Amino acid sequence: MILYLTTKFATETAWCLVGLAWFRRERALSLLPSGARYGLLRLALGWLLGLSIRNLESRPSEWIVWFGILLPLRWMAWSIVGTFIDRREIRLRALLAIDRRSNLWRLSGVGLSTLADLPALLAGIWTGNLWP
């Protein structure tokens, strides 16, 4: 579990650094403390959103949970972090879609979060109901 959390934190921090460089147009290395804070925020949001689906009364198939619930929750978590990084107000429109560049960053964040789950998934530990 420690290795999994470390991998998730490192992946999400690295992608937050990319977001800081893209949206604020500053050097990513000088933003390492901010990137780590946003990475931790993304990790916490994932955990909190994961708790919201963990105890579903009628448990649908894992694929339905994955594609119908988990991926949209990951999009929402990356949207919230992206809104903070871009220093925008949190509004529904900003959480759903803003522009092509922001959407690409969010979609890539969802993909990277999913890739960071791959070792746990291959080990037979389905993390989706715990960590979007």
Image (spheres, helix red, strand yellow):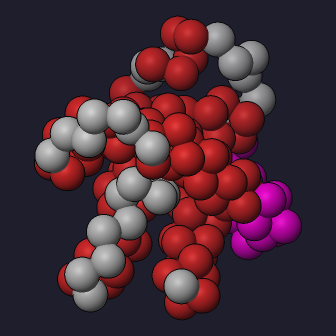
31 is higher (above) or lower (below) than 123: above
Q: Position of residue 83 (x, y in %)?
A: 66, 30
Residue 28 part of the magenta segment: yes
Q: Picture quarter containing residue 94? A: top right
Residue shown at 30% from the left, 69% from the top: 126
38 is higher (above) or lower (below) than 33: above
Read off the magenta span. Answer: 20-37
Q: Position of residue 14 (x, y in %)?
A: 58, 68
Residue shown at 48% from the left, 58% from the top: 131
Q: Is residue 103 visible?
A: yes
Residue shown at 20% from the left, 39% from the top: 60
Q: Is residue 101 visible?
A: no
Closer to the camera in the image, 122 or 77: 122
Taking the view exactly as shown, the residue that stands out farthest to the front is 57
Q: Give the main secondary structure of the magenta stretch.
A: helix
Q: Position of residue 33 (x, y in %)?
A: 84, 67
Residue shown at 64% from the left, 11% from the top: 91
Q: Position of residue 16 (x, y in %)?
A: 62, 56
Count of marks placed on residues? 0
Q: Picture quarter containing residue 100? A: top left
